[in-house]
Image: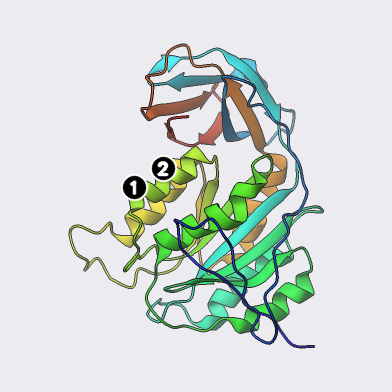
């Protein structure tokens, strides 16, 4: 049976996703089901939160143990609910020519997720250089995913920001009420994207999409133009700004297990109605837990 490759065309002005099959004709990707609690009632703000007890006890964390500050003002929490719903995870893999990781290492980093996802989770694997190409469509079939990874090949320049925005527009935005994650497997370098880093991060925050990173060695060794964010800074801010976390590409098994476990066991949905929110402005967001509780969430609330 012929192996198929699809392509996400990154025209951010045209809201259409065209898939190209290497050995056949065009097909359409269908969004998978996997609904989660919808805490975003009329007029409210919904925030995805990772929360765990430092003593590793598994009793659920309650709203009384959490505080949220919008623009520095403490808010009244409407709802704080565990979210064990299935995840929709996009593995966005840098397979540009100069990344300091061979194809085998990139394949392994992606492969580990296929064997760590929980029942109901789905993976979409996208490789990118100047274009973002679907290597494996939404699936939980580990053997099928492993076979599709042989399509990875290194070429071109890394358009990371354009690729993230293409994934949001074409793959994740239709799944508004599902748990949506991007795992970036890269050093964070972008060369040539039309989108800026600031635009990309703001869109991720607006869409409530967490970004995790499996980080490769910085190919620039710090030598990069001043007007371009350094790869390490990009990775740090993508994770910190969306509530995600960073792992090393040298420990892909540990990274995949930690991410998949966290998404099923430690995710919560927090909602509140802002007591005062300047119209059309982004606001700082801070979610804190009581002593003995570690919490991560996005750092900004973008304008509604």
Helix, strand, or loop for circle 1? Answer: helix
Is residue 39 something that shows in the picture?
A: yes
State if disc 2 and disc 1 touch (CB < 8 Å). yes
Give how far across and how far down residue 206 sits, in percent: 48, 38
In this view of the protein, which residue sits in the foreground, 170 or 285? 170
Number of numbered labels in the structure image:
2
The CA distance from mark 1 to mark 2 is 6 Å
Q: Is residue 39 left or right of residue 230?
A: right
Residue 176 at x, y percent in the picture: 64, 42
Kindly identify the residue that appears in the image at 42 percent across and 61 percent down: 162
Q: Position of residue 117 (x, y in %)?
A: 73, 57
Q: Callout 2: few (<14), some (14-19), or many (20+) C-alpha neighbours within 10 Å?
A: some
Q: Residue at x 66, y 80 (%)?
A: 21
| x 80%, y 88%: residue | 1
Eyeballing the image, is 98 above or below 16?
below
Q: Is residue 166 left or right of residue 61?
A: left
| Vertical placement of residue 45 versus 298, above or below | above
- How would you rate the neighbour count of disc 1 (Cα within 10 Å): few for under 14, some for 14-19, many for 20 or more? few
At 67% from the left and 67% from the top, the residue drawn is: 112
Q: Quadrant of residue 150?
A: bottom right
Query: Disc number at residue 202?
Result: 2
Q: Quadrant of residue 290?
A: top right
* Lateral position of residue 36 relative to residue 205, left or right: right
Q: Which residue is mark 1?
A: 198
Residue toward you, 122 or 223: 122
User: In the displayed structure, would residue 121 be above or below residue 186?
Assistant: above
Q: Position of residue 171 (x, y in %)?
A: 61, 56
């Amino acid at each position: 049976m012929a192996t198929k490759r699809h392509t996400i065309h990154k025209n951010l002005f045209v809201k259409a996703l065209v898939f190209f099959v290497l050995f056949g004709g065009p097909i359409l990707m269908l969004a998978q089901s996997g609904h989660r609690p919808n805490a975003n009632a009329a007029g409210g703000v919904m925030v995805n939160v990772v929360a765990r007890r430092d003593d590793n006890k598994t009793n659920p964390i309650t709203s009384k143990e959490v505080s949220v500050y919008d623009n520095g003002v403490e808010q009244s929490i409407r709802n704080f609910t565990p979210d064990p719903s299935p995840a929709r995870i996009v593995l966005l893999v840098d397979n540009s020519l100069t990344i300091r990781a061979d194809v085998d290492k990139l394949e392994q980093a992606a492969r580990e997720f296929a064997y760590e996802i929980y029942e109901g989770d789905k993976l979409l694997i996208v490789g990118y250089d100047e274009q973002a190409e679907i290597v494996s469509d939404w699936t939980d079939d580990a053997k099928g995913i492993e076979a599709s990874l042989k399509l990875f090949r290194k070429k071109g320049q890394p358009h990371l920001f354009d690729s993230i925005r293409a994934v949001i527009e074409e793959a994740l935005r239709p799944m508004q009420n599902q748990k949506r994650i991007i795992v970036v497997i890269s050093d964070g370098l972008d060369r040539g994207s039309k989108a800026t880093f600031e635009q990309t991060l703001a869109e991720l925050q607006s869409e409530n999409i967490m970004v995790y990173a499996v980080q490769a060695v910085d190919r620039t060794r710090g030598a990069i133009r001043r007007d371009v964010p350094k790869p390490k800074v990009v990775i740090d801010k993508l994770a910190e700004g969306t509530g995600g976390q960073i792992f090393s590409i040298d420990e892909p098994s540990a990274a995949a297990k930690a991410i998949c476990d966290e998404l099923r066991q430690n995710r919560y949905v927090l909602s509140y109605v802002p007591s005062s929110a300047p119209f059309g402005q982004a606001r700082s967001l801070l979610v804190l837990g009581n002593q003995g509780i570690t919490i991560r969430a996005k750092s900004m609330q973008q304008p509604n």
